[in-house]
Image (spheres, rainbow, N blue to C red):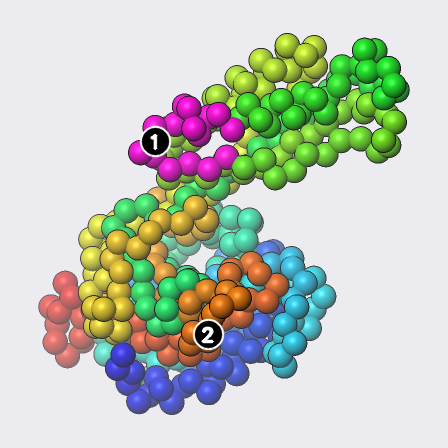
Amino acid sequence: MIVSPPIEALKPELVRIRHQLHAHPELRFEEEQTAAFVASYLQESGIEVVRGIGGHGVVGTIKRGDSGRAIALRADMDALPLQELNGFSHASQHAGKMHACGHDGHTTMLLGAARHLAAHGDFNGTVHFIFQPAEEGGAGAKKMLDDGLFERFPCDAIFGLHNWPGLPAGNFGVRPDAIMASSNTFEVEIHGNGSHAAQPHRSVDPVMVAVQIAQAWQSIVSRNVDPNAAAVLSVTQIHAGTAVNVIPETAVLRGTVRTFDTAVLDLIEQRMRSIADGIGGAFGAELRFDFHRMYPAVVNHPGEASVAGAVMRAVSGSECVDENVPRSMASEDFSFFLQRKPGCYAFLGNGRLRTSQAASDRPSYQLHSPLYDFNDDILVTGVTYWVELVRTWLGSHRNRGCGS
């Protein structure tokens, strides 16, 4: 990878910023100090800033030349409700809060790109730097859209980047179609008839109903979904009872469904509801079934994915870019942006996964692990990608027509 001297010179500052953000994580809807830092840093770089979009969202804008073309780059800012177990000096200083998904690194890379482009940006058009709150389950992207993001900051395309443990550090992954799954949650509340555990014949046992429903649901993916389609149905919670000798009145099932295809999701929801109603009726129980569609699948646009792939190859070399990277069943609310604008979401390798046998180059823990940390060595890679993407998409002000 070739990094320009000005970007390489930024690395100590980028590491300092990333460590500062990591040590002071803020959860979704609470990113007040993070947003203030981001806005201040952009303003110090001479960038026009608007705050308070969709909550604590921040947008910085740079315009050069006379082109009407515009590109948007997005980073997420929020942390997770997780107790960090790392012992290094920049570990979280706030109990129960941790940057376990690398949003501290995402924010830092976009800040670095903004500062570099403000000082050295030879492009013809407009760049919007979008710093989004509440990605972790808060649908912050949708809240920014509802607050008029694209009306207030028009763009031709939007791009996002997520660090990815399992990819070698500095490698890229992208694909021209669905890259991450939709995220959906469900809850079933079962109402039976409680009794003494020694007299089960006097009960309508909601625990037994819950167990039967959970087991029957596992046939949906294996027997109703086309084997060529990808889907996950996971029951992650069963709550019932308070004593070993009491059959309770109620039981609750919760979990998640992940798919890439809306038709598959429709099928799964319908079958879940039908199976739950049928089993509940057979046992004489009443139940309430709720299914909540949170984030749509992240579906890249082929043209924008092609441009992103070309930039990745220029930054890291063809051997370090997978343009048909395996899809992930994880989810991302960047999907809301891609439903409104052409764009591309991609992965930047955080390092090979750490295992008990690992002796690789700075192996990485998985996302959402209490031992995870963003790899500082890829900060300049991410900055370089953003800078070159802007130059490729908008073209040079001195050489008009490039990238058009």
Residue 226 on the magenta segment: yes
Visible residue check, residue 109: no
Q: Residue at x 55, y 23 (%)?
A: 216
Q: Which residues are magenta?
A: 218-233
* Front residue of this view, candidates 120 and 239: 239
- Could you tell me residue 89's position as x and y percent? 63, 81
* Image side of residue 189 versus residue 382, left or right: right
Which amino acid is tagged 2? Ala
* Image side of residue 28 versus residue 349, left or right: right
- Could you tell me residue 340's position as x and y percent? 34, 46
- Above or below: residue 185 compared with residue 283: below
Quadrant containing the N terminus in the rendered view: bottom left
- Mark 2 crowd level (few <14, some 14–19, many ≥20, 10 Å Cα): few
Going from the N terminus, do you reach mark 2 or mark 1 first? 1
> Which corner quadrant of the image does residue 125 belong to?
bottom left
Q: Residue at x 75, y 19 (%)?
A: 205
* Front residue of this view, candidates 271 and 205: 205
Q: Secondary structure beneath disc 1?
A: loop
Q: Residue at x 70, y 10 (%)?
A: 284
Residue 259 on the magenta segment: no
Circle 2 is placed at which residue position? 359
Circle 1 is placed at which residue position? 227
* Image side of residue 402 versus residue 183, left or right: left
- Above or below: residue 349 compared with residue 302: below
Which amino acid is tagged 1? Pro
Question: Gap between marks 2 and 1, in whole Å?
Answer: 37 Å
- Above or below: residue 50 compared with residue 249: below
